[in-house]
Amino acid sequence: MALSHDVLVVGAGLAGMRAALAAQAAGADVAIVTKVYPVRSHSNAAQGGINAALNPEDSWESHAYDTVKGSDYLGDQDAIEILAREAPGAIVELERMGVVFNRDEHGRLGSRNFGGASHARTYFVGDFTGQAILHVLYEQLVKSGIRTYNEHFCSQLLADGGGAVAGVTAFDMRSGEVLQIGARAVVLCTGGIGRVFEPSTNALICTGDGSALAYRAGAPLMDMEMVQFHPTTLKSNGALISESARGEGGYLLNSEGERFMKKTAPNAMELASRDVVSRAAQIEINEGRGVDGCVLLDVRHLGAAKIMERLPQIRELGLEFAGADMITDPVPVLPGMHYQMGGIRTDVHGATPIAGLYAAGECACVSVHGGNRLGANSLLETVVFGRRAGAAAAEFASGRKAASLPESLRDDEERRLRTLVERPGTERTAALRLEMGTTMTRQVGVFRDEPTLRDAERKLALLRERFAGVSIGDKGRLFNQALVAALELDFMLDLARTVVAGAIARTESRGAHTRVDHPRRNDAEWLRHTLCHHTPDGPVVSTAPVTITQWEPTERKY
Ligand SMILES: Cc1cc2nc3c(=O)[nH]c(=O)nc-3n(C[C@H](O)[C@H](O)[C@H](O)COP(=O)(O)OP(=O)(O)OC[C@H]3O[C@@H](n4cnc5c(N)ncnc54)[C@H](O)[C@@H]3O)c2cc1C
């Protein structure tokens, strides 16, 4: 029997679950397709917290302004205003659903400091905030009875005769069976593209599948050059040491024991925005004041009791992957790929330019983060814009008849996947993936210039050609992870090229994008978004204006 729903959400992280619940509340029949069980989504890894101007002395305007400034004025201010205005309600809603946020000694919700914020407005659960929220939303999902296609890999978007999105194909990894699922509206909530870089703080599943599907279907990807390098990641495996370490009072030191942030951000110091801190740390390393390619994160002065109460998980990460106990030793850290500010362009209701296609969460670019995301604004974005996208998708679905898609589309997709599994070849997915990731880290990192980017562009084009020769070792149907990995690499190769294309096009330095050959921000020409359009020959870049409501661009100082 043909499967069909009013609204189909792809992805079951925070954005996906919030979107599904909102669509159901608006009266739609909803289902979720997810390649991992919902609670294994990367949202689970979020450590530091979620922002809202909830204290009486704080205001949504202050939160919005900090976000605009953090974005280096590339964020769209209408979207940022919505984010900041809806934040307090979103936190209270999560709390009422059951998220046990930290409370202060008076029993009130307690917040911590975070980078780039003028007030302590980050609400948290220890250093595992994402896990706490994800599990509570999952309870709501179970209660709702929303159908979840777990361990189903969405491999394609389907369109009706008029070009509107009308469903997806997905294969059940447990059986290998391909399904065709019709939908009057599809919401992509497929998360970040972290694994385009190697290493990354992101889970191995963060391969940008939905972003690539939308891009191939004709939706532009916006500001893809805006990749966040988090200042404190571990050298051995790229794992994140949360900003909460600095939020709680941690220092960054160079090999001379100097708090080097005083040179670039004398006021905010270690709590300047992430782009500023990452650049400063990378300069220390590049100019020979690093320690074995790292700088040092020192929280010893906080004392064992506070570290164990507020930072237990990251202490464990330091112990296990850097051999350093934060209670007694500084931990070596370096800037590493953490977050993609860019993504599928949407309006403030999550709508993409393709009828019936919506997006929210890290895969989308609405754009609230612009050139640089403030820590703890991303969890907020998932719930605020997840809810809005789910509601808008339900409304769109209610006004549209279900398209009758031919059943043969399922058979076509099955054939395509079979051919991929059976084709001969000598290339290995893992080797190409590693080459792509290390090229991106070395050549499209914190500091960039045209010749190095052009060389990366050439290397990626060659990797795309070599992908045609990939042989999939596992010829079976059940849990064919080799097939999944090849499909993910196929997506990532497209996305890597959009990051490089955006970085070549943007001949200025703004936010996380630093061009050493164009060291200044250039508002006259580049107070604009880049848009990457898919063509068979690779990405083509155009630009679009930034929405300014009340904050005119000025120089950014911390
Ligand atoms: C280590 C770490 C710490 C972080 N800490 C913070 C923090 O403290 N505060 C903050 O604000 N932000 C933080 N972030 C960022 C934030 O966690 C993410 O941006 C956010 O959780 C993304 O949520 P999402 O719902 O968009 O996607 P995800 O949670 O990544 O979920 C993606 C979903 O898409 C599904 N999916 C993907 N591809 C397919 C496919 N082909 N078919 C079917 N399903 C698919 C997956 O199964 C998954 O369910 C952190 C990120 C990392 C990596």
Image (cartoon, rainbow, N blue to C red):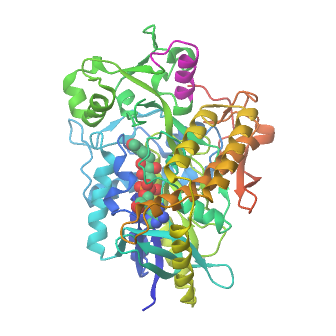
Q: Residue at x 26, y 65 (%)?
A: 139
Q: Is residue 10 above or below residue 167?
A: above
Q: Residue at x 64, y 36 (%)?
A: 513
The count of marks equals: 0
Instruction: Mark yes or no: residue 116 visible.
Output: no
Q: Position of residue 243 (x, y in %)?
A: 40, 33
Left or right: where 546 falls relative to 317 = right
Q: Quadrant of the C terminus?
A: top right
Q: Position of residue 81 (x, y in %)?
A: 55, 51
**In this view, which residue lies farthest toward the top?**
256
Left or right: where 454 falls relative to 255 = right
Q: Residue at x 37, y 33 (%)?
A: 241
Residue 37 placement: quadrant: bottom left
Q: Is residue 182 above or below residue 426?
A: below
Q: Closest to the observer: 537 or 287?
A: 537
**In this view, which residue lies farthest toward the right?**
524
User: Residue 286 colored magenta?
Assistant: yes
Q: Position of residue 349 (x, y in %)?
A: 56, 65
Main secondary structure along the magenta-highlighted residues: helix
User: Residue 416 colored magenta?
Assistant: no
Instruction: Mark yes or no: residue 139 visible.
Output: yes
Magenta range is 276-292
Q: Residue at x 50, y 15 (%)?
A: 260
Q: Position of residue 523 (x, y in %)?
A: 76, 37
Q: Quadrant of the N terminus?
A: bottom left
Q: Closest to the observer: 395 or 536?
A: 536
